[in-house]
Amino acid sequence: MQISTIAVIMAMAEEAEPFIREMGLAPVEAAIDGPLPLDVYAGKAGTADLVLIVGGKDPRHGVDCVATQPATLAAYLAIERFKPDLLINAGTAGGFRGRGAHIGDVYLGSGCIRFHDRRIPIPGMDAYGVGSYPVPEFKGLARALGLKRGIISTGNSLDMVPEDLERLRANGADVKEMEAAAIAWVADLYHVPLLALKSVTDLVDTETPTQEEFLANLALASEALQEKLTAAIAYCTA
Ligand code: ADE
């Protein structure tokens, strides 16, 4: 497929910083009308236009807009405004040591992206809650870049209650994060192919508190993410 525009969605400024630097992306002021705090950057990847939408700072709480609501809005605006041929969601995730994850591994989302915290025990609504949005396999890309392929599961919490773990297992999750399924819902509605890349900051099936491990490894994982994201874009635009 000829790709003329790629839109990348990332939640946190620190996750995005190495990528912005590497690609020489420039901020686009006033790209989004109104009060939404999303930050937009633009640049080129070969001859293709490259747009990056970052969640921005929540004006009430002063922190990065992580999790599903900002991600849904970012995906909607990315598609409506920039009409990308390819949408990429890049970010960090918790991995499962028991499924072979290591800190700094970058996973390519495979199969279906699901939610693990939308429990609606009503016939029909239960499946809607889980979502199960299929994504393209990008097998050649995964092979060329040496990426692990794995199942991504999304929820609105960094930590995990026992019901989450049960559902993460039922989802076959390799990594747990907070945006991909929200973006996959929009990509599925609009029939835009979604490539999801998730870099592991923490291992959720160990004793170390997730938030400590996440903060300690955020810079390392964001660099690893940048390397694979830049290579994936080069592969897709070659
Ligand atoms: N992002 C990075 N680590 C995460 C975790 N353990 N859960 C959800 N999102 C994450």
Image (cartoon, rainbow, N blue to C red):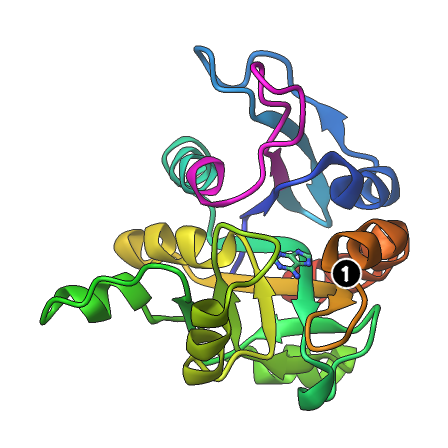
Mark 1 residue type: Pro
The residue lying toward the viewer, choosing from 180 and 88, is 180
Classify mark 1: helix, strand or loop: loop
Which residue is at a point 54% across and 52% down the rendered structure image? 157
Please provide the residue range marked out in magenta.
50-71
Q: Can see residue 238?
A: no
Which residue is at a point 69% across and 89% down the rendered structure image? 98
> Relative to 178, does residue 124 appear above or below in the rendering?
below
- Asked if the stretch drawn in magenta spans residue 56, the answer is yes
Q: Is residue 33 left or right of residue 202?
A: left
Mark 1 burial class by Cα count in 10 Å: few <14, some 14-19, many 20+: few
Which residue is at a point 41% across and 35% down the rendered structure image? 73
On the rendered image, what quadrant is the C terminus found in?
bottom right
The residue lying toward the viewer, choosing from 222 and 208, is 208
Q: Is residue 3 left or right of residue 48?
A: left
Q: Is residue 59 left or right of residue 169?
A: right
The residue lying toward the viewer, choosing from 116 and 46, is 116
Q: Quadrant of residue 15?
A: top right
